[in-house]
Image (cartoon, rainbow, N blue to C red):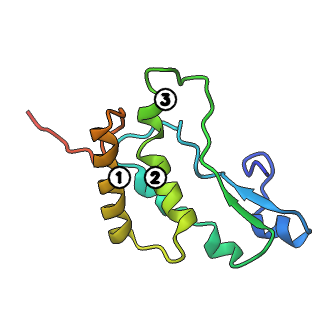
Amino acid sequence: MTFLKAFPVSPLQVMKSGHPVLFSSCWYVNYIKYGTDWLNFYRCDPTSEVGDNRLFLGGEACMWGEFVGETNLLPYTWPRTSAVAEVLWSHKLNEIEAKHRIEEHVCRMRRRGIPLEPLYYRHVYT
């Protein structure tokens, strides 16, 4: 695992040196952003760079805990990590299809009582 901000090295460069890669640099779910941000997580696709390389182990969504506790852990996590899972499990990315699957999963989680952030934010003008 490399921390790209500390070591500006691409996953491909790491694999060329013979080391396996577990990617996470753009999937830190604790970064606070306003508005709909699951698309930012979905559009980060390391497989477009590394291709089908046996040294690419996959990826993970991460969260630092300084500003996260029992009241905001689940809302920060969902639906962002659903977008990360879509990237890691899909062989070909398609935002329209992913949006429908994530919307369905959001409804499923809400029915189960899991607190999560809205998939989309609507601006209300008064």
Q: Can you say whether 7 is above or below 33 in the image?
A: below
Residue 71 vertical position relative to residue 3 in the rendered view, above or below: above
Disc 1/disc 2 C-alpha distance (Å): 8 Å
Q: Looking at the image, is 86 positioned above or below residue 73?
A: below
Rendered residue at 52%/21% (across/down): 69
Task: Decide if residue 90 is in sight here.
Answer: yes
**Residue 103: percent from the left, percent from the top?**
30, 55
Q: Are marks 1 and 3 in contact (CB under 8 Å)?
A: no
Q: Amino acid at mark 3?
A: Leu
Which residue, given by chain and number where applicable, does mark 3 sit on?
A: 73
The amino acid at mark 1 is His
Residue at far left of view: 126
Mark 2 belongs to which amino acid? Ser
Label annotation for residue 82: 2
Which of the 4 image quarters holds residue 109?
top left
115 to 9, vertically: above or below: above
Q: CA distance from mark 2 to mark 3?
A: 15 Å
Q: Position of residue 3 (x, y in %)?
A: 76, 48
Left/right of residue 69 with respect to residue 94 in the rendered view: right
| Dots 1, 2 in contact, CB < 8 A | yes
Q: Which residue is mark 1?
A: 105
For the residues carrying marks 1 and 3, which lies nearer the camera in this image? 1
Q: Which mark is residue 50?
A: none
At x 30% / y 56%, what residue is drawn? 104
* In-image side of 18 versus 26 (left or right): right
Residue 115 left/right relative to 122? right
- Crowd band around label 1 with a 10 angstrom C-alpha radius: few (<14), some (14–19), many (20+): some
